[in-house]
Image (tube, rainbow, N blue to C red):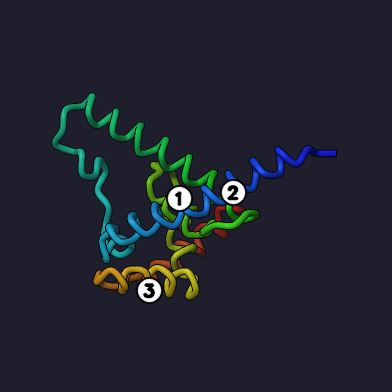
Amino acid sequence: MIPASVWIGLSAVSALMFVGSLFVLRFLLIRMPADYFVRERQAGGDWLGQHPAMRVLATLIKNVVGVVLLVLGVIMLFTPGQGVLLILVGVSLLDVPGKRAIELRIVSNPTVLRTINHLRAKAGRPPIVVDEERAQRATSAQRASRR
């Protein structure tokens, strides 16, 4: 039998994760550029002109935060919280092959896109733009790579 203190602790952690995810997600989704899913990405990104040590440190920190958010998002699929949206934000921070296809597949879901754009509209930000053709190609390429 599991002691009541463990259940209380798990409940408190779950509640904190839920509230924390609401603030983090809102902040990140509002700050995301509206054309994030349609623009071409260049290797090196925003840190291209910086010192190599700074680029490595920034990439490391960005990937660690991405992994943490991804893991929390997966946990929140089974506990209270914004699991799918947190997974999207976590994946968007990672530098991994196939990332774009995963992002496009998640954000192309009408419910996810509607939720993101609702949050952005409340903050006075333009809606996220998704190129449906590119999303279809990414989904098809991802399916073909699994075979």
Which residue is under mark 2? 14
Q: Do the numbered discs 2 and 3 sit on residues whose CB atoms are within 8 Å? A: no
Which marked residue is nearer to the observer: mark 1 or mark 3? 1
Q: Secondary structure at mark 1?
A: helix
What residue is drawn where x is 52% and y is 54%?
A: 18
- Label 2 sits on what residue type? Ser
Q: Secondary structure at mark 3?
A: helix
What residue is drawn where x is 47% and y is 40%?
A: 67
Residue situated in front as seen by the camera: 28 or 103: 28
Q: Secondary structure at mark 2?
A: helix
Q: Give the quadrant of the C terminus.
A: bottom right
Give the percent coordinates (x, y) of residue 122: 31, 72
Give the percent coordinates (x, y) of residue 6: 71, 38
Q: Do the numbered discs 2 and 1 sit on residues whose CB atoms are within 8 Å? A: no
Task: State which tag comes first along the sequence, 1 or 3.
Answer: 1
Q: Residues within 10 Å of mark 3 (few under 14, many from 20)?
A: some
